[in-house]
Image (spheres, rainbow, N blue to C red):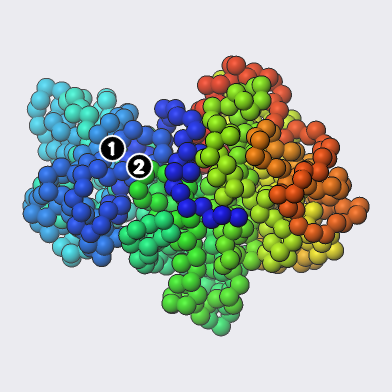
Amino acid sequence: MKIFKLFSLIYFVLHLFSSSVLAQYQAEATFDDQDDLDSTPEVNNLETGTNVTIRFEGDVRRSEITEGKYGRGADFYNGAGAIHFNNYQWDNAFIAHFWAKLRNFNQGNFLMDSNRWRLYPDSGELILELTDSADATHLYSTNLTWPDDDLFHHLTVRILSMDTNPLFIITLDFNNPSEIQVPFFLADSANIPVMGQNIDGIIDEVILANHNHATLSSEQDRFNRDPEYCPEGVTCLEDSFILTPRTFSHEVPVRFKFSYDPLLCSENNPCPLLFAIQGGSACNNDYAMPTDLVPMTLAGFIVVTIDPYCEGAGNTYIPETEVSQFIAVKNYIQSDSYYSTFLRDDFYSATGCSHGAEAVMLWAMREEDHPFRTFARSSELSGHCPRVAGKLCAYPGGTENLPFDIEGEDAIKWQMDTDTVAMIDSTAVNTREIARSWGANLEGPICPAPGESGCKEEGYWGMTYGSRRFKTVWQYFEDEENPSGYFVEDIGADCRHCAPPDSVAFSCGICFLYHGRMAMENHCPECLNYEDDTIQPGPRGEECPLEASWYEDPLTEINNSDAGVDGDTDDFISGDVDIDNDIIANETTNENTGCNCNNHQHGKNKQAFFYFFFLLLLPIYRKISLS
């Protein structure tokens, strides 16, 4: 199996459809996508789904890699210029997060909307200047003072009801927010947020949003941005190092957080290592959720969550780049970190949600240095098959009507590099353990009606479809007397996307990670018996609907029709599936997977399909579905 090398392939898949949608953030910038002291104006590292461009104006340059908060920052030496965020889509709310270090406490503007409002330091005191609709100027003290310690400090600027009587909430270093209620209308916006104008200092890790998400009211947001923050009862440590990931030509910072329960894990009582990878598609806030991590630490794991570096082109899912960072962090923790003495042994596992589930699945299936146990919550990796299956709801009539070329070179390469079903063989099932959970609606895959929110069936996007296919092939290879895979559908009104901690699938997955597939019979037999009413075994995977001349479906190579159905094989047949051999025709069950929709509203749902497909790729959707 070839290893994925070309970023363009990922770009192709992530951009099969284009649509203007609500992104979690309007802009992100960490300034590490060029070399030290580079002043190339375009900073193209935005979250997928926005049209914002970030440009250096004047003599702003990227700092040396050791000078930013994490890696390179934007250096405004002696007040050298500003950063402009062009095409920013204003709404009735505005949120900004960034780190800054000042050399001059009486110069420049941290952030401004020209002729409307600006935040600036005056002898270290943070001052908010506002211009009303009659062009009168008003000054407000935030009662916040910038520390004179030559260190980075974090600013959050939040504006609510911007177009009526705005409320400004300004927070320094995550504590004691300063609130300023404005009793008048602001002047018209200049429509371009400007950061760092004439500041003498360095700014790093910038996020701008235009709606009321990712604010300090959320523990997830605090956990992502505050390196000192840790959920109650858990001990945390943030660390980082410099790395040149695969596919990169220059060094970048990789940051990560340890979390563990000090009552369970110590030098005298070492614990197993577990990596937890976040879902969503944002670049510089990608730690896993505390609501996920705390149950994992209470189960006796040392949990490491990684913010994989994804600078460069606005897309986060670059398997080669991300997985190489996971492995580098793992090596660092095991050999160079303070907590290496807390680790039970070299054994380690990985779990991921949604986007993170796809990443850990590729880590488990493609890498020589792979996790021994992997729990993937709502992953769809099986090449084009699940994507095609999901899209057939919006494009009836077979694959010839899909808006991309299945016979094209890009489609073929993407399939070869991501088809985890075709990666399964007897070596895989004998050297690692895999668990997958996915959400399913008992009514089967339903195309959502136009304007309707919520997940109807993960098979609509291919997650149920891809997971069932993976399950069928994995269970064909594994020894039924010594199984190494665990697969569960989690039934719920919201499809239980990513198996939240209150789900049976989550607790069973943690049992699997800690004890292993065989030991589940002793430690959590209810998981294997599906005794919970919300859990049921899923049907056999369905053949791929690709209809491509080059594609040979691994499922058609399995000539025992009973193999792979919940591990119940009448006649186990050993040996590897070889997709290069002649296809052996085999009739598969016609179950409700991702190929069919119940309400048949294909024409009406085309617009809704675009909306829901992109929502799946965005962190905001994940937060909604987990709530």
Q: Residue at x 20, y 27 (%)?
A: 189
Q: Answer few, some or many: residues within 10 Å of disc 2's Cα (few below 14, many 20 plus, some between 14 and 19).
A: many
Task: State left or right for residue 453 relative to residue 491.
Answer: left
Question: x, y percentage for residue 510?
Answer: 65, 59
Task: Identify the image quadrant of the C terminus.
Answer: top right
- Report the front residue among 544 and 256: 544
Q: Residue at x 66, y 21 (%)?
A: 397
Task: Identify the image quadrant of the N terminus.
Answer: bottom right
Residue topped by disc 1: 53
- Report the front residue among 47 and 109: 47
121 up-or-down from 116: above or below: below
92 up-or-down from 585: above or below: above
Q: Amino acid at mark 1?
A: Thr
Q: Residue at x 91, y 54 (%)?
A: 571
Task: State left or right for residue 538 relative to residue 233.
Answer: right
For residue 472, the mark is none
Q: Is residue 483 visible?
A: yes
Residue topped by disc 2: 46
Query: Do the numbered discs 1 and 2 sit on residues whose CB atoms are within 8 Å?
Result: yes
- Alpha-carbon distance for marks 1 and 2? 8 Å
Q: Amino acid at mark 2?
A: Leu
